[in-house]
Image (cartoon, grey):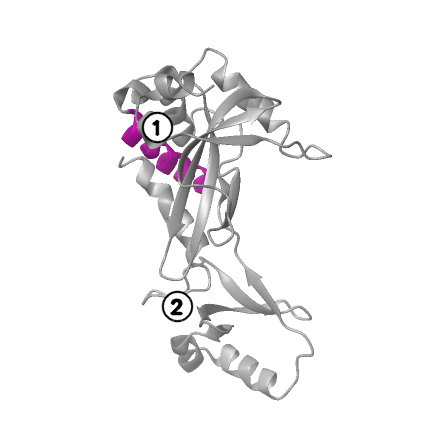
């Protein structure tokens, strides 16, 4: 758990982007305003209300940085016809590991040590630690909770009537945001991991391929890793 906790802040940055910064400044690591004509740029904090999102130059920098003072004076005088806001992107690998960890814990809560000590439970831990590539994107889908068709918890995904994988769906909430993150998990059969490899090839297929998600009843959801798979037909 100590090893896995190092990348969870990346997920929080993504969810909290634009929320009111804490005392350390913007939740995104590097947001800057730049004059493209000169490449001159300065860090800003992002602040969002219910109606709008603003960027603000840091108070300490405005007081002590003469170049920034001159930049702001020119900006207010209309000297810059165009300014660009540069937003540092989140780390996709850290985000994937954070989602895998949360999905793994969802599996543990429902399936217990049968899942934890299974072959694929071990492989997922290796993926969290960067020792093994995970076969599909994590999260496979990230969408606002409002209007989402995904149910929190565990479902089974079918392709052309064949059971393929589990779908782990998590609700991720902050003070201002609520989203559903869904990720494919291997089924417990000998081909479970390879089935995920096959799903990876479908992610960008055109035309898109329709998958069916079967909701697992709560009583079966907690029956165990193998039982939850075999009891749903």
In the figure, is residue 40 to the left or right of 108? right
Asked if 223 appears above or below 75 in the picture, the reply is above
Q: State the SS at label 1.
A: helix
**Residue extending furthest toward the top:** 190
Residue situated in front as seen by the camera: 94 or 19:
19
Marking on residue 20 = 2
Marking on residue 61 = none
Which residue lies at the image location 36% right of the left edge and 56% below the top edge?
174
**Residue extending furthest toward the bottom:** 77
Residue situated in front as seen by the camera: 20 or 202:
202
Which residue lies at the image location 45% right of the left edge and 50% below the top edge?
179
The residue under label 1 is 221
Image spot of residue 97 (x, y percent): 42, 36
In the figure, is residue 19 to the left or right of 40? left
In the figure, is residue 35 to the left or right of 59? right
Highlighted range, magenta = 94-111
Asked if 78 appears above or below 40 in the picture, the reply is below
Image spot of residue 209 (x, y percent): 66, 31
Disc with the residue nearer the chain's start (2 vs 1): 2
Q: Nearer the viewer, mark 2 or mark 1?
A: 1
Counting other residues with Cα less than 10 Å from the Cα at mark 2, is it few (<14), some (14-19), or many (20 or more)?
some
Quadrant of the image for the N terminus? top left
Which residue lies at the image location 68% right of the left edge and 35% below the top edge?
208
Q: Are marks 2 and 1 in contact (CB under 8 Å)?
A: no
What main secondary structure does the magenta stretch of the protein show?
helix
Image spot of residue 186 (x, y percent): 46, 22
The residues tagged by marks 2 and 1 sit, at their Cα atoms, a distance apart of 38 Å
Residue situated in front as seen by the camera: 218 or 27:
218
Q: State the SS at label 2.
A: loop
Asked if 69 appears above or below 209 in the picture, the reply is below
């Amino acid at each position: 758990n100590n090893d896995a906790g190092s990348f969870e802040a990346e997920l929080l940055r993504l969810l909290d982007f634009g929320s009111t910064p804490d005392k350390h400044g913007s939740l995104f690591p590097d947001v800057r305003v730049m004059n493209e004509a000169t490449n001159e740029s300065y860090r800003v904090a992002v602040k969002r209300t219910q109606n709008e999102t603003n960027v603000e130059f840091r108070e300490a920098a405005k007081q002590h940085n003469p170049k920034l003072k001159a930049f702001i004076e020119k900006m207010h005088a209309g000297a810059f016809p165009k300014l660009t806001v540069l937003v540092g992107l989140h780390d996709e690998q850290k985000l994937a590991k954070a989602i895998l960890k949360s999905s793994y814990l969802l599996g543990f809560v429902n399936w217990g040590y049968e899942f934890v000590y299974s072959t694929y439970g071990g492989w997922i831990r290796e993926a969290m630690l960067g020792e093994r590539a995970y076969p599909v994107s994590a999260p496979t889908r990230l969408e606002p909770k409002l209007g989402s068709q995904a149910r929190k918890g565990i479902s089974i995904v079918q392709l052309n009537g064949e059971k393929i994988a589990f779908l782990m769906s998590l609700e991720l909430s902050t003070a201002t945001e609520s989203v559903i993150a869904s990720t494919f998990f291997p089924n417990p059969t000998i081909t479970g991991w390879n089935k995920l490899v096959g799903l990876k090839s479908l992610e960008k297929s055109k035309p898109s391929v329709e998958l069916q998600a079967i909701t697992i009843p709560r009583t079966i959801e907690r029956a165990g890793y193998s039982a939850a798979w075999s009891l749903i037909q």
